[in-house]
Each structure stands twice: as C-alpha cells, then as structure tokens.
Image (cartoon, helix red, strand yellow):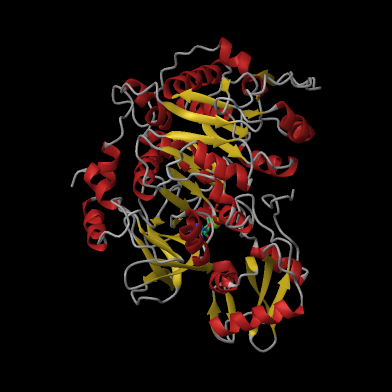
Amino acid sequence: MEWAVIHKVLNRGAGAPNLGDYEQVRKAFSWDQARNELAGLPGGGGINIAYEALDRHVHEGRGERVALRWLAKEGGVGDFSYAELAELSSRFASALNDLGVQRGERVFTLLGRVPALYVAAFGSWKHRAVLCPLFSAFGPEPIAARMAIAEPAVLVTSAQLFRRKVMPILGQLPYLRHVILVDGLVAPMPAVPLAAGESPAPAAQSAPETTETSDGRIVDFQELLDSASPEYTIGPTDPEDLATLHFTSGTTGRPKAAMHVHAGVTAHRATAMLALDLRPDDVYWCTADPGWVTGTSYGIIGPLAVGCTLIADEEEFDAERWYRTLAEQHVDVWYTAPTAIRMLMKAGDELVKGYDLSALRFIASVGEPLNPEAVVWGQRVLGLAIHDNWWQTETGGIMIANYASMDIKPGSMGRPLPGIEAAVVRRAGQGVEVITEAGREGELALRQGWPSMFRGYLKEDERYAKCFVGGWYLSGDLARCDEDGYFWFVGRADDVIKSAGHLIGPFEVESVLMEHPAVIEAGVIGVPDPIAREAVKAFVALRPGHTAGEALRKELLAHARKRLGPAVAPREIAFRDSLPRTRSGKIMRRLLKARELGLPEGDLSTLEGGA
Ligand code: ATP
Ligand code: MG
C-alpha cells in the first residue's frame, strides 16, 4: 500500500467503517517506508531534523510558504517563510561554528515562544549540537539542576530571563562558554497588523537594560546572526546522532533527561500525519510550551516536516485570545492538553459563540487523561470531538491515538499507531507476561524499536535499563485494552490506590466526579486506612457559581457512590481553589498526597507557580 493511501485511509473522516481499514493499514505500514519518505541529506549524508523540516521544502520549491506565524504578546504578527527560517537557522549554525561549539555539545534554550527559539533549535540541529529546551518559567534552581546534568556549552535566553534567573547561578556554570541574548531579534520582528483597520503592531521595544556583568561570555543574538554566514552546509548526520535532550515532566518524581536522536524525525513526520491528520497546506497550532516534549516533537518538528504553517503564540492561556486565534488564523488542526480544555470549559459555553471556528477540522489532546466529559463538551460546544492520544517524553512521539477515521470511545486513548505494538502486561519473575484477556488491568508496554524512541536517560544508565524487560519498554502507566483493541488509561503505577483488595485507578474516580456539574477538576489519592489499607480521598475544584460546603460534599459523595459503588468511591472529599500541577499541565497527585500525609514534598522544580 502506498504511503499516501495509508494516510487517506486512516484519515478519511469520522463515521466510515474503519476497524478493518485500521488493521489493513497497520499491516501495510513499515518504518522503513516512512523513512523513505524523508529526503535525506544531499549526497547520502544521512538524516538531519533541520534538513527534513526546513531546507528540504526550500529545495523542493516550497520555500515561500509561511513556516512560522508568530503571534506576539502585544498583538503583532510576524511571518517567517521556510526559506527565511532556513537561512536564519543556517546563520545560527554558522555562528555556533564561529564560537567553536562542537558537534554533540549541548545548547540550552530558556525562551518563551519567540522566533529566536525556532532559529536556535534548527541552527543547533544543523550544527549537530544537542538542543535542550527549558521552560522559561523555571527559576534559578531548576535551571542549575538541569545544567549540572547536561553541562551545556551555550545558553540562548532573553536579557530579562538572564538577569532574573541565570545571573544568580552564573558562578556555578563553569562549562557554559556562551550566553546568547535574543532580545535584539525579538523586538524588530517584521511585525504586521493583525487585520486591516486594527492598530499597528508595536514598534521595536526599547533596548534591554544593560546586563550588569563583567562576564565575557555574553553575546548578542542579532549581532551574532548578522555577522555569521547565511550559508551552512549540514555535515553528515548519522540518524543515531543525539539531537535533543528533554527533561520529563517530573509528575512522579525527579525529572529524567531523555535523549533523542535525528532518526526521530521519521516518526514525528509520520505520526503528525497519522494521528494529528496534518496535511501540507494546513494551518496548525500546538499550544504546548517548548519546554515540554510536545512543544518540540509536535510544536516544531512534525508539522514543519509535513510542510504546514505553524502558529506560535507568545502569550499564555487566555480563553478569549485562544478562540480568537483559532478563528482569525483559520486554524485547521489544533493540538492541546486536557488542562487547557478544562479551562475553556470553565470559561463557559457562551464565549465561543462569537467566533467562527469553521476552518477547524481536527482537535487532539495529550498529556493527561482526557475525561469523557471533556470529549462530550468538545462535541457539543466546539462542534468537534477531541481526539485523545497517549505518549511520553521517552517515546518521543505519539504511540496510541484516536485517528480522524476512528469511532471515538470517550475516555479511551485510542489504538496503537501503525508501526507500534502496544500491550498490557504483568511483570512475572524476570520477564513480562502479556495479558490477553480484554479489560484486565496491567502495565502499558511497547515493543522496542520505533524511530523516536529515547536512547537513554543522560547519566542514568541504570534507570534507563530498568525500563526494558524482554524486548518491551515498560511505561510505568497502568491501562487496560478492550475487545476492540482500544486502550484505556487507569493511572500511573505510582498513583494506583489499593483499597480493601481493589486496585483503584484515580482517573476513573476523577472522571466520575467531573461528571457532576459543580466540578471542573478533580485529583484522587489513597490515604492510609487501618482496615482497608488505603482509602480514596478526592480533591476537587469547582466551576464558577458553585460554593464549597457540607451540602455539596454530601451530594458529590452520593453521586460518586452511585456511579462507582462504595468500594471505589471516595470516602473523603476536600475542596480546593485549584489543584497542584506541573508546567506541562499534569495534576501532581504525589504532592497532594505528600501534603495530606505531612511527608517531604520531593522535587517541585516543575510545579506550576512553584520553584
Ligand atoms: P515523570 O516521568 O518525570 O514523572 P511525566 O511522566 O508526567 O513525568 P511526560 O513524559 O511529560 O512526563 O508525561 C508522560 C505521561 O503523561 C504518561 O506516562 C502518562 O502518565 C501521561 N499521559 C500522557 N498522555 C496521556 C493520555 N492521553 N492519557 C492519560 N495519560 C497521559
Ligand atoms: Mg514519566
């Protein structure tokens, strides 16, 4: 079966009889075939992410197409064509070369969603340096801790972030040879007004305050680019060359640095087409922060490798702005996260009515379980179902998904992508046993060997080795698989509650609580119980207009008991204004639990609003 045919079959629209097609496509698909779709560096020089995502399009005559449309915080729009981005990143690669940065050395970015981020990312990949994007909201401690692990030679950041967050720790970073400050490029962007009649884009910001440091490591991004050559020939790139380093979200503990290689672009491109339904002419918006793996795999690489126009919004979440962006930019495909969807739900059903979302064809979500309630809300209020998909920092790309052509079972993560073998397993002695019985819970495992698979945790070989048993990668998540081959998330292995002989997944309890009209968010943990071993305790945040109190508590307990039965329903419910979550939007159940039990809070470097 031809690749184009595979894509067409998988994404031919909801409602088609599709399970048969799914099996057919799975059989026909191979990673070799997906790799053959890549251009490869000229002269057989290997596979390089930057070449596949940018230069390839220029060489194939599509250089004038907009690759990146940047929406500035203040309201301006800056367009960069594939050709422009290719040239800017070549300049950055030349600059790294001029600075003496070697292949394999680490380049950290500490930036919001600004054009310089994309330039630095692609420039680093061209030079075969290793990119490591950090959340710009990180404070000095998490930055220092991550740098100590990866020892970057270069940091690209803004003057403001540098002053606030890096200056205090500069003395601890002996390996850091260059700090590149980008404010120069951010300000004089080729900004144009949003639409005719609207106020023009803001003028270039005033020059950043001078950065008071005698440190000779600081260079200006713009000056660097201006003096660097626009020509850069990408050197031979082994597909196994390290490309990106990504720290996990730290939901379950200390973050790990997952190592990814250039070969991963094969999977980013293929899965962007298969699971996100991306087509070359699409306008695509990924709301994930670049400090999280989603912001790289599907916020930069995948969609550009397909040839889409990428929307990058510098601003953080704001319901009104988001609806406006979807409407004004004619976004075709939108990739977001349950936490954002819950915030849109919280903003009410009316707001969206003022916006024309008719261009929108496909919505997908990742990062946390997508409660059935949210899928139903999407259908009712946005007019489109939200397609959940599952993957991890370690897997580098989407593994299990609800495709456009699949019937969605709300609450299910979907089915494994072509080329991915997933199973529910139980650990048995030194090995694992695949659970074939439908509906039975176990650990979600993936058969080793897809291109975007991580190649290690930096400096943590033992932790890495422990992830693999008998040819399977063990994800640490619990799931079940139904008779149609759909996978259902049960919970993190660490979060599962053992109560009176039952294994209770927090997700199931949280989803039932969210069915109640008063609840917008729920986090469920186990607390010690002398008889049952653990009892279920729920923390809930309410929708505007609802008041916490004894009456509502009783009502929620009764609702949960009716839906779940007394063995699984929470015994206690506590009200919170909001729940602690990671910067990638995941509820931190371990923190709820530590606080509840008065235990040490552990690594909080990724806590939103935290360190
Ligand atoms: P850490 O490994 O440091 O604890 P983390 O696992 O949260 O952090 P990520 O790699 O960003 O770091 O997140 C992957 C995890 O997110 C998955 O293992 C799973 O628990 C959760 N997840 C992602 N997508 C989904 C989904 N669609 N449904 C349920 N859970 C999901
Ligand atoms: Mg994890």
Residue at image location 45% in from the left, 52% down from the top: 364
Dividing the picture into quarters, in which one does residue 358 lie?
top left
Q: In this view, does 354 lie above or below 375?
A: above
Q: Is residue 479 above or below residue 147?
A: below
Residue at image location 79% in from the left, 34% down from the top: 168
Q: Is residue 490 above or below residue 60?
A: below
Image location (x, y in percent) of residue 490: 50, 70
Q: Residue furthest left?
A: 1
Q: Nearer the viewer, residue 328 or 593?
A: 328
Q: Residue furthest right?
A: 212
Q: Nearer the viewer, residue 468 or 130?
A: 130
Residue at image location 31% in from the left, 69% down from the top: 484
> Is residue 380 at all visible to an observer of this figure?
yes
Quick check: 326 left or right of 238?
right
Quick check: 450 left or right of 259?
left
Q: Residue furthest bottom?
A: 531
Q: Is residue 519 above or below residue 177?
A: below
> Is residue 30 at all visible to an observer of this figure?
no
Dividing the picture into quarters, in which one does residue 219 lie?
top right
Q: Nearer the viewer, residue 208 or 529?
A: 208
Quick check: 72 left or right of 392?
right
Image location (x, y in percent) of residue 557: 65, 81
Image location (x, y in percent) of residue 202: 66, 23
